[in-house]
Amino acid sequence: AVDWIDLQTSKIVVSTLVYTEGLEIFTSISAEFRVDAAGNIQGHNAMVSYTDLTRSKRTTFTALLVIVCLGSLAGVAINAWQLMKSKHCKWGLQTFELISRSSMCVYALVLLLTWMNQVPMSEEYDHLLHAVLDFHGNGHAEFDNLVQTYFDAKTLIYEETQWLMSHRITIYLILYLQFAQLIAYFAVHPRLAMLTDTIAGALDHMIHFFMLFVVIFLMLAFMASWMLGGDVHAFKSFGEAVASQGKMLFGEWIYADNADDLHGAMVGMYWLYAISFMLVLFFTLLNFFLAIVVEAFVVVKGNITDDPTEQNLVMDIADLFSIRLTFRRFHWGSHGVLLKALQEAVHARGADEGPQLMDLKQFAALLPQAAQNAESLTNFVRTYAHKCPSTIAIGSEAAGAAEAVQVDPRVQSLDDAFQGASKILRPALVRMFDGIGEATWSYEKTFAGGHYVHRVSANFVRERPAGQVENVAEMIVGGMAMSSSVSAEHCLM
């Protein structure tokens, strides 16, 4: 082996294989020696272990991979259907979910196929062991054959360990996708969405903060490497200075190991750097970051407190099951169907038409026929008034919300016409009947004589004390009006 080493040798690797019986663990241990440009020898060791799955574990592993593949495939189909059919889905979240589940499905299938084609490590070790045991010392040819067999087995083992390492990295990246998806799922409930909402609220400030932080951090690292790199090992290169500042940032140390060896002006240069780092990065910018996060969290917490529909997670999970039983009990139909009908009704009105107020008659039309009665509607109002009182508008609150709803322009034009007609009719009637009030208008559509008759009536009511005798004008028009009211009718044929 010494004959293999010459001036052109860059590294030497001493390797051996270890088998742990019972646990079926096969370990490759390598000691690597490199010669750098200055002639120094630097040592490095590496150890890679591989576990062969026995029959029962092999079956379990295969079954779990199949389950993962089928489950993620079903998730991909659901995501694709929601993206194509749903009009109100969150496209960003659904697309990310589709990518995450697709990668899980494809990788599980690839891992299953490539793993099943791998030669068991026990067979590789068996070949290697027989290559050594079958050597009988019959000349150089047999020895060369032994060496070649050893290196062939070692190469196969190395390829399998590299295959294992590549899959470890791939699985880590897929798990990171699942981790991000898990955080996104927390947005399903306001209390759990505090993390995502806080990040979203502080994102703009955080981006600008990190722009400022990175520039100052790298500038200080370059200054430390430039001035102190020749005397302080922690700053001997720009990369080492960046790594050392990272440790200093987390409070691992502030005083470098060999800073005591500095003399003269270098002591002042070191402490000028250290004080600048502590004041600017450690005390100021880190507290800026905490202030940004805390401020966004306070806003999110305030929004949760002000939300009248918010409950704790346990109550919402319990309500998720109890409300479906309540729907069955009072024959309100499907919870999902009613929710979809309400969403479509709100969407049809438009988002800019003020409060989405709906009276009981309009709401009853969304319920099944069996639930369109006073008792069922009363139970519905009572149930949701108990769960969330703000969903029910009564009294002045309902009136204020109704006034805020935008009126149909055609209805507004008709109302203006009624007001104009009242201004013409009322002065004439006042001269005949003292004390009449403002007009109240009514509309009626009837079918008579093969024609539709549209009747618009203006009713003027005069308050008359009890016992007062009718005046002459009231007697004349008595056959035309009832209860001291006069109707002006207009028929359109």
Image (cartoon, rainbow, N blue to C red):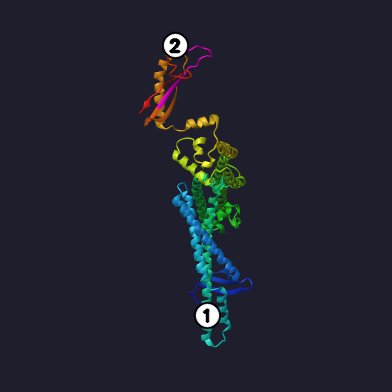
In this orientation, which residue lies closer to the viewer: 143 or 323?
323
Q: Which element carries disc 2, helix, strand or loop? A: helix
Q: Residue at x 45, y 21 (%)?
A: 459
Residue at numbered disc 1 = 149
Name the spot of residue 413 as percent of width and height, x first.
39, 28
In which quadrant of the rendered image does the C terminus lie? top left
244 displayed left or right of 438: right
Measure the C-alpha gap from mark 2 to mark 1: 132 Å
Name the spot of residue 54 as percent of width and height, x first.
60, 71
Q: Which element carries disc 1, helix, strand or loop? A: helix
Name the spot of residue 333 as percent of width and height, x first.
53, 45
Magenta run includes residue 462: yes
Classed neighbour count for the residue bearing mark 1: other residues with Cα under 10 Å, few (<14), some (14–19), many (≥20):
some
Q: Residue at x 53, y 82 (%)?
A: 146
Name the spot of residue 366 as percent of width and height, x first.
50, 41
Q: Which stretch is magenta?
A: 455-472
In this orientation, which residue lies closer to the viewer: 378 or 113?
378
Kind of residue sitting beneath label 2? Val
Q: Do the residues under discs 2 and 1 have CB atoms within 8 angstroms?
A: no
Q: Residue furthest front?
A: 449
Residue 414, compared with residue 339, is above or below; it is above
Query: Does the image show residue 210?
Result: yes
Residue 174, compared with residue 52, is above or below; it is above
Residue at numbered disc 2 = 472
Kind of residue sitting beneath label 1? Thr
Classed neighbour count for the residue bearing mark 2: other residues with Cα under 10 Å, few (<14), some (14–19), many (≥20):
few
In this orientation, which residue lies closer to the viewer: 282 or 259?
282
